[in-house]
Image: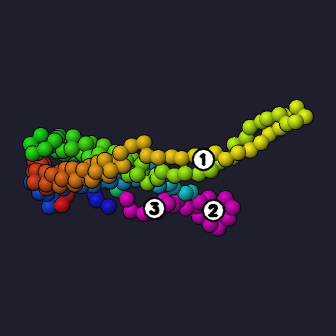
Amino acid sequence: FIIYNSTIHQFTKGKFSMNLKEAFRYQKFLTSLLNSASGAIISREHMFKTTEEHLKHKANPEAEDMIEVVDTEDFVPNDTVIDFMLWIVGEKDRLTVAINEAKRKAPIDIDAALEANKARQEIKSRVAYMLTNKASARTERGTDYRFNAEGNQTAYFYDIIVTTEDNFDRARAKETIKMLGNISDRTSAEIDAALINTDVSYITAFS
């Protein structure tokens, strides 16, 4: 458990710069700290100090009453944890601003590239599913009615041949999947390069 000292404001091994990939990882780390702190302050053991007063003397004149504070595990006081949570919010805000500034300096629009790749993957998966379905032919049974020699209406049965065939260009669909895959791979490489090579101006509080 990381203890924040609200008086000293000291942390270990801060660094002056990081790339975007590290910044996003650090952003998730700060979120995990905030979630952990949020869980800590709603624990009843942390919210209250429990005191038990053992009234032994009333039941046994030879015994003495005793006051006992229920022992709980070591923890950071909630007032300190709340201060720490407020500090994290400020750090997350500062980091987000630094990330946005770094994105503007990146060689590509990272957010747009990610959204475009997400759309390409969606199209690719749909087209791939379409290609898994094959044309077929099957025989079903049909029913109709006619009048017999006595003038009564009777049913008769006959075969229905149901044939399905591609209503799209299968070869073009395969080429589309290949094309989308190539563009997605190339874009992913550009995104990775931008994340690694773009510096974020931010001083970390933790290593």
Whether pointer 2 and pointer 3 mark residues with C-beta atoms closer than 8 Å, the reply is: no
Three-letter amino acid code of the residue under disc 3: Thr
Where, quadrant-wise, is the N terminus in this rendering? bottom left
Q: How far apart are marks 2 and 3 (CA)?
A: 24 Å
Name the residue at the bottom extreme: 62
**Disc 2 or disc 3, which is closer to the eye?**
3
Q: Nearer the viewer, mark 3 or mark 1?
A: 1
Q: Where is residue 160 in the image (x, y as percent from the top left)?
A: 64, 45
Q: Rate crowding at label 2 as few (under 14), some (14 to 19) or many (20 or more) other CA atoms within 10 Å.
A: few
Q: Which residue is drawn at 26% across and 46% down?
A: 117
Residue 68 vs residue 8, the one in the foreground = 8
Which residue position holds label 1?
Answer: 161
Q: How crowded is mark 1: few (under 14 residues within 10 Å), some or many (20 or more)?
A: few
Instruction: Name the residue rendered at 25%, 42% in the picture.
Output: 116
Give percent across and percent down for residue 81.
Answer: 33, 50
In terms of secondary structure, where does tag 2 sit?
A: helix
- Residue 92 left/right relative to 77: left
Q: Which colour scheme is used?
A: rainbow
